[in-house]
Amino acid sequence: MAEVTLPLASALLVLLLALCWSTWLLHLQRKKTESIQSTLEDTIEERTKALKESETFLDALIENLPDMIFVKDARDLRFIRFNRAGETLIGVDRSAMIGRSDYDFFPKEQADHFTRNDRAILESRKMAEIEEPIATQKQGERWLRTKKVPILDAAGIPRFILGISEDITLKREAEHHRIRLIEEESARREAEKNLTLRNEFLAIAGHELRTPVAALKLAGDIGSRVLAEPDGPEHQHRLHELFGVMQREAQALHQLTENLIDVSRIHEQKFQVSLQRSQDLKIGRAHV
């Protein structure tokens, strides 16, 4: 009986040891699994936290940019994102813009224009830069320089349109003001040039006036003396020469007067002083 009991006890002992060993292995495995699970949870938590921080940073960046940022769904061109600058520029609360399209905020003609541009960008899959006016709710017409970028998925299919719009209204006004100043300065210089030309012309004209007036005066004096002389062929010849001198000088005086009256020629720089300096004074002086 003792011989039978001893093997049975040994078997039970071995079985008990095996059970303890298996339990210990299960315990170790459970600990290892719990450790892996804890590490995995920590990793997921860290990555989730990092993702949230990244999203928070991106949101803060978009919200604080001075330019309007918007995103449209490529399928129906409805707004799915709008930043604070865009809300201020358009004059509509962004909560009222999400899920709606350009047709809900702009005149139909302008909304049609925006839609054509968006569809062309989606079709080309290339960024486009556009300068155009828009009608805002509170600020009237504003000029924007907008860059529109198609956002593609892994298969290269456009999913969204990203828009970045800079308000260039003040820049355009400043540029137009600068151009006006340049034009005004150019006009001022042209006026000064014309004034100088006019003064030069008047100086020349004043000098030229003396020539025909002096010639006419001298011819008149000589004519009076000739008329007092006895009549004859030589007398008639001298009178004829004097009248020729007077006629030519009178024509020169008339031409100078026309140039003085025609102010438009002065402004257009088309005037010409065409006065014949009479050499016939020699004829008159010969008779003195």
Image (cartoon, grey):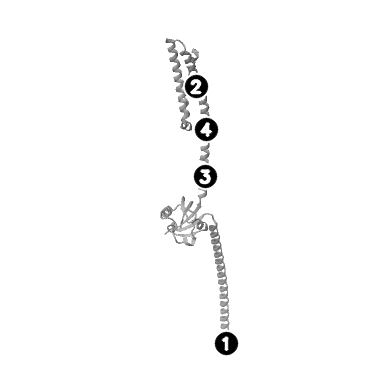
Asked whether the beta carbons under mark 4 and mark 1 sit within 8 Å of each other, the answer is no
Residue receiving disc 4:
195
Callout 3: SS: helix
Disc 4 to disc 2, how far (Cα)?
26 Å
- Front-lying residue, 235 or 92: 235
State whether residue 128 appears in this view.
no
Residue 213, labelled with which disc? 2
36 above or below 273? below
- Between marks 2 and 1, how big is the CA–CA gap? 167 Å
Earlier sequence position, callout 4 versus callout 1: 1
Q: Which residue is mark 1?
A: 5
- The amino acid sitting under disc 3 is His
Q: How many marks?
A: 4
- State which tag comes first along the sequence, 3 or 1: 1
Q: Residue 259: x, y in percent?
A: 47, 28
The kind of residue on which mark 2 rests is Val
Closer mark to the observer between disc 3 and disc 2: 2
**Residue found 47% across the figure and 26% down from its top:** 257
Which amino acid does the dot numbered 4 rest on? Answer: Leu
- Observer able to see residue 134: yes
Mark earlier in primary sequence (4, 3): 3
Going by the numbered disc 1, the residue's amino acid type is Thr
